[in-house]
């Protein structure tokens, strides 16, 4: 359980926003796998929301099964962030998150994201305006949070001070991705510095983020930093069931990864079928859905023996029907004899580095 102001999450495990990936069907899929306490939309441009941009409204889509859903906004002090936050409250957001970590030029050069780490006082003022607007608009029902990096670079470790200042103006939780802006996604997340942010705040929860690829890493991050919740990004793209397994570990008196059971190949094939179904039922165009599933298979394939074959079938598929057929054929072959994934893949080995996604995923911004 994790409390963020008035919101109580069933588990302290959060699905990270990953632009171009964590859309509504994927959030629902992770939730159905179990263990997700909160999932959020990817970053949404405050102006585009208020202008009614069709692309942004699609990204902001949620539904009752996607509850509780956070909506993440980005912008700078000149943008209508308070107004966009009120719009989000009216459109199903149970939490508003301010993006203070996006390193991509298109965002961080002038619009916000990591740019907000460069002037902490201005950012705190902006956060205060958003908090006040949301408090008034939602009657105190919807908390406002911030997701930040450690700082722009190693000479500017601003996260502890910024988190404390944000708390003083009513921000109700901070998520800290343990990298500098200049690192983008390279190198290793610095968990020790996340711990320094935990020590800096007074009462609000800190959610640690970065390089969680195995359920046991959740336990390690909580123990090493004292953080209150854990956000998982790329690890969930490969293994959307990671939340359920991590939640099982968290409930064991002595967490033991050997007691966990990874889904079988048959389970994984069913999950991918389900993802196709979710894309169809949420009215994504065939073209967009095909594109999404090709991206997805690049990740899912990594956790399936002979997943390369499936990846190739998806790469050349011209329709969702073809994908579903390829999946069914693969499932039959697996059931007929291909050895299923060994449960030993679950161990608590040190974090491996997730594959870096390309910036092209942000091309819609
Ligand atoms: C392609 C890509 C897109 C991302 N989009 C967002 C985003 O929209 N909002 C955000 O706060 N973080 C975004 N992130 C950062 C992740 O939420 C997360 O902080 C980062 O990937 C580290 O966590 P992980 O190691 O669990 O993936 C993105 C990361 C990647 C790789």
Image (spheres, rainbow, N blue to C red):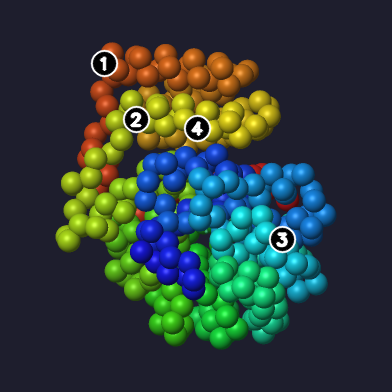
Q: Relative to 15, does residue 5 appear above or below in the rendering?
A: below
Q: Is mark 4 within 8 Å of ligand 1?
A: no
Q: Could you say which disc has been placed on residue 267 in the image?
A: 2
User: What residue is rendered at 52% in x and 75% in y?
Assistant: 172
The reply to whether residue 343 is visible in this rendering is yes
Q: Residues within 10 Å of mark 1 (few under 14, many from 20)?
A: few
> Crowding near pointer 3: few (<14 within 10 Å), some, many (20+)?
some
Q: Which residue is mark 3?
A: 87
Of badges 3 and 2, the one in the foreground is 3
Quadrant holding the N terminus = bottom left
Q: Are marks 4 and 2 in contact (CB under 8 Å)?
A: no
Q: Could you say where residue 91 lies in the image, as x and y percent from the top left?
A: 66, 55
- Answer yes or no: do the residues labelled 1 and 4 have beta carbons within 8 Å? no
Of pointers 4 and 2, the one earlier in the residue sequence: 2
Residue visible at 52% across and 28% down? 277
Report how far apart the C-alphas of labels 4 and 2 lie in the structure: 12 Å
Q: How many marks?
A: 4
| Residue position for label 4 | 275
Asked which quadrant contains residue 131, the reply is bottom right
Q: Which residue is mark 1?
A: 337
Instruction: Of the two numbered discs 3 and 4 on the same chain, state the one appearing first in sequence.
Output: 3
Q: Which labelled disc corresponds to residue 3?
A: none
Please tell me whether residue 185 is drawn above or below residue 273 in the rendered image.
below
The quadrant in which residue 156 appears is bottom right
Of the two numbered discs 1 and 4 in the rendering, the one whose residue sits closer to the viewer = 4
Q: Which one is in front in this view, the residue at disc 2 or the one at disc 1?
A: 2
Asked if marks 2 and 1 touch (Cβ < 8 Å), the reply is no
Please report whichever mark, 1 or 4, sits nearer to the chain's N-terminal start: 4
Distance from the alpha carbon under mark 2 to that under mark 1 = 15 Å
Given this view, does label 3 or label 4 mark the residue nearer the observer?
3
């Amino acid at each position: 359980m994790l409390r963020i102001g008035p919101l109580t999450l069933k588990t302290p495990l959060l699905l990270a926003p990953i632009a171009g990936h964590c859309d509504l069907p994927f959030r629902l899929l992770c939730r159905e796998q179990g263990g997700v306490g909160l999932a959020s939309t990817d970053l949404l441009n405050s102006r585009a929301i208020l202008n009614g941009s069709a692309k942004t409204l699609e990204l902001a889509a949620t539904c009752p099964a996607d509850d509780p859903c956070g909506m993440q906004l980005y912008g700078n002090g000149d943008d209508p962030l308070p107004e966009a936050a009120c719009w989000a409250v009216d459109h199903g957001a149970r939490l508003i998150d301010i993006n203070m970590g996006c390193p991509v030029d298109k965002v961080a050069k002038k619009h916000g994201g990591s740019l907000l780490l460069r002037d902490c006082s201005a950012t705190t003022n902006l956060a205060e305006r958003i908090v006040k607007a949301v408090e008034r608009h939602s009657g105190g029902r919807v908390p406002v949070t911030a997701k930040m990096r450690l700082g722009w670079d190693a000479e500017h470790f601003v996260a502890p001070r910024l988190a404390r200042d944000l708390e003083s103006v009513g921000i109700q939780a901070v998520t800290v991705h343990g990298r500098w802006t200049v690192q983008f996604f390279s190198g290793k997340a610095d968990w020790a510095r996340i711990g320094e942010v935990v020590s800096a705040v007074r009462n609000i929860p800190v959610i640690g983020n970065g390089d969680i690829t195995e359920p046991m890493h959740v336990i390690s991050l909580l123990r090493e930093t004292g953080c209150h919740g854990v956000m998982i990004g790329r690890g969930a793209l490969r293994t959307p069931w990671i939340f359920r397994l991590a939640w099982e570990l968290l409930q064991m008196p002595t967490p033991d990864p050997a007691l966990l059971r990874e889904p079988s190949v048959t389970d994984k094939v069913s999950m991918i079928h389900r993802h196709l179904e979710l894309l169809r039922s949420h009215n994504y165009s065939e073209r967009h859905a095909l594109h999404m599933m090709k991206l997805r298979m690049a990740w899912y394939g990594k956790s399936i023996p002979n997943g390369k074959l499936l990846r190739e079938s998806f790469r050349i598929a011209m329709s969702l029907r073809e994908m579903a057929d390829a999946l069914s054929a693969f499932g039959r072959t697996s059931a007929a004899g291909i050895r299923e994934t060994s449960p030993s893949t679950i161990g608590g080995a040190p974090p491996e580095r997730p594959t870096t996604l390309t910036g092209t995923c942000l091309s819609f911004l």
